[in-house]
Amino acid sequence: MASSGSDSGEPRGAKDEFPVPVKLSSFLDERLILYGMKARTKREAIEELSSIVAEMEPELDKGGIVKSVLARERDCTTAMGRGCAFPHGKLAGLDRVIVALGRCEAGIDFDALDGKPVNLIVLFVTGKVISLEYLAALAAFASLSRDPKKLSAILSAKTAREIMKAADELDVTFHG
């Protein structure tokens, strides 16, 4: 009788190649990195990052992005602590994930779970249907926030180009 699985008795495909190392830079575009954000509030930060997304993607409406992200934030904060927030919004008709990264030296009150200000804001804009690309990007940045050395490399960068370089040098691992 032909075997339908591996020697371990598991069906084929049950053992994926996870955890997967991935470069953070694979989710970023340097033009969507904003160092030195002017925002002082959660809403202003979301508006500031939504503006650069709408500038780069003219088919997207800044107001629609902001509305979607703020609706999600009303449900539950996306600031998980350690100075990081991962706000995200879903837009009808979008078939990819767009990631904008903002760095705020002073810190912003983002209603973080640990009560501390947020210095790194990673905005995700995606379609209404959850994609593997979106989940991978969210998992990769969440993994970054749990690794103090890697997070420090991003937070110590002083320009968008330096942030992109640090992101390119960092492999983060996430579990699929």
Image (cartoon, rainbow, N blue to C red):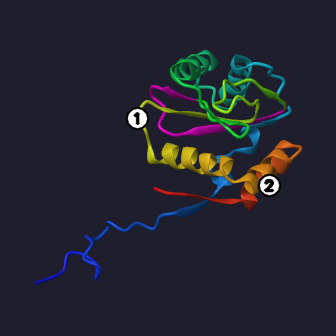
* Residue 14 to residue 142: above or below: below
Q: Is residue 102 magenta?
A: yes
Whether residue 26 sits left or right of residue 83 in the image: it is left
Q: Quadrant of residue 158?
A: top right
Nearer to us in this view, 104 or 79: 79
Nearer to us in this view, 135 or 93: 135
Which quadrant does the N terminus fall into? bottom left
Residue 168 in percent (x, y) is at 73, 57
The range drawn in magenta is: 88-105
Question: Which residue is denoted by mark 2 in the rendering?
Answer: 165
Residue 58 in percent (x, y) is at 63, 26
Q: Secondary structure at mark 1?
A: loop
Q: Amino acid at mark 1?
A: Val
Marks counted in the figure total 2
* Residue 72 to residue 1: above or below: above
Q: Main secondary structure of the magenta part?
A: strand
Q: Is residue 169 magenta?
A: no
Residue 101 in percent (x, y) is at 71, 38
Name the residue rendered at 45%, 48% in the picture: 132
Point out which mark residue 129 bears. Answer: 1
Name the residue rendered at 57%, 16% in the picture: 67
* Residue 21 to residue 162: above or below: below
Residue 66 in percent (x, y) is at 61, 19
Q: Secondary structure at mark 2?
A: helix
Mark 2 closeness class: few <14, some 14–19, many ≥20 residues within 10 Å: some
Q: CA distance from mark 2 to mark 1?
A: 31 Å
Whether residue 95 sits left or right of residue 116 in the image: it is left
